[in-house]
Amino acid sequence: MKVNQLSIFLENRAGRLAEVTRLLSEAQVNIRALSLADTSDFGILRLIVSDFEKAKAKLKENGFTVGRTTVVAVKVPDKPGGLHDILTMLQNAEINVEYMYAFVQQSGDSAILILRFDRTEQGIELLQKNTIEIIPGEKLYTM
């Protein structure tokens, strides 16, 4: 039920992000989802990719600092209140969302949320108990 996410430290300078995408392209690794958070000096690029190990090896051999983070992907109705319902459920169980990002599937009837919890196992249990569809990594990597 967990998803492997690449977390890449990037200096905040022109071309650094393009270097990451070039390396992944050369390695034939597809980016499924991404998030970039930055400050004036550096950024953290978070990626869900089609082949975690290949991407990690390619980036590391080219001097990038790369880590693995465990996240959870859930399917949410693409309608007003869909996100709020899940966040309220997590809040009521005192599970903190450290960060999240989302993308809409082609059909447009649902969105996929990528969530990082402070208590991952409890978050997964709560989502399952409330029949929220959790997307396994193996499926997400090939969507």
Image: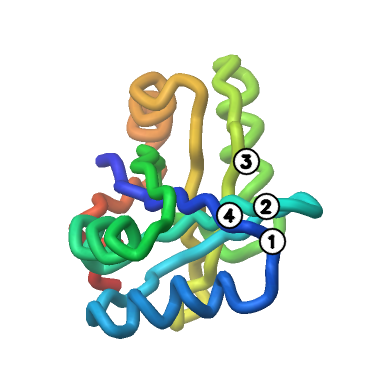
Q: Which residue is mark 4?
A: 101
Mark 1 burial class by Cα count in 10 Å: few <14, some 14-19, many 20+: some
The spot of residue 47 in percent (x, y) is 44, 59
Query: Secondary structure under badge 4?
Result: strand
Query: Secondary structure under badge 1?
Result: loop
Judge from the rendering whether residue 41 lies leftward or rightward of residue 23; answer left or right. right
Residue type, label 2: Phe
Mark 4 vs mark 1: give the one in front. Answer: 1
Q: Using the numbered discs, state the Cα–Cα distance from disc 1 to disc 3 in whole angstroms.
A: 35 Å
Mark 4 vs mark 2: give the one in front. Answer: 2
Judge from the rendering whether residue 48 lies leftward or rightward of residue 56; answer left or right. right
The spot of residue 38 in percent (x, y) is 71, 53
Mark 1 vs mark 3: give the one in front. Answer: 1
Disc number at residue 42? Answer: 2
Out of 8 and 46, give the one closest to the viewer.
Answer: 8
Mark 3 vs mark 2: give the one in front. Answer: 2
Kindly identify the residue that appears in the image at 45 percent across and 82 percent down. 106
Q: Which residue is mark 1?
A: 12
Q: Using the numbered discs, state the Cα–Cα distance from disc 1 to disc 2 in whole angstroms.
A: 4 Å
Q: Are marks 1 and 2 in contact (CB under 8 Å)?
A: yes
Kindly identify the residue that appears in the image at 36 percent across and 30 percent down. 124
Out of 19 and 46, give the one closest to the viewer.
Answer: 19
| Quarter of the rendering containing residue 122 | top left
Q: Using the numbered discs, state the Cα–Cα distance from disc 4 to disc 3 in whole angstroms.
A: 16 Å
Q: Using the numbered discs, state the Cα–Cα distance from disc 3 to disc 2 in whole angstroms.
A: 34 Å
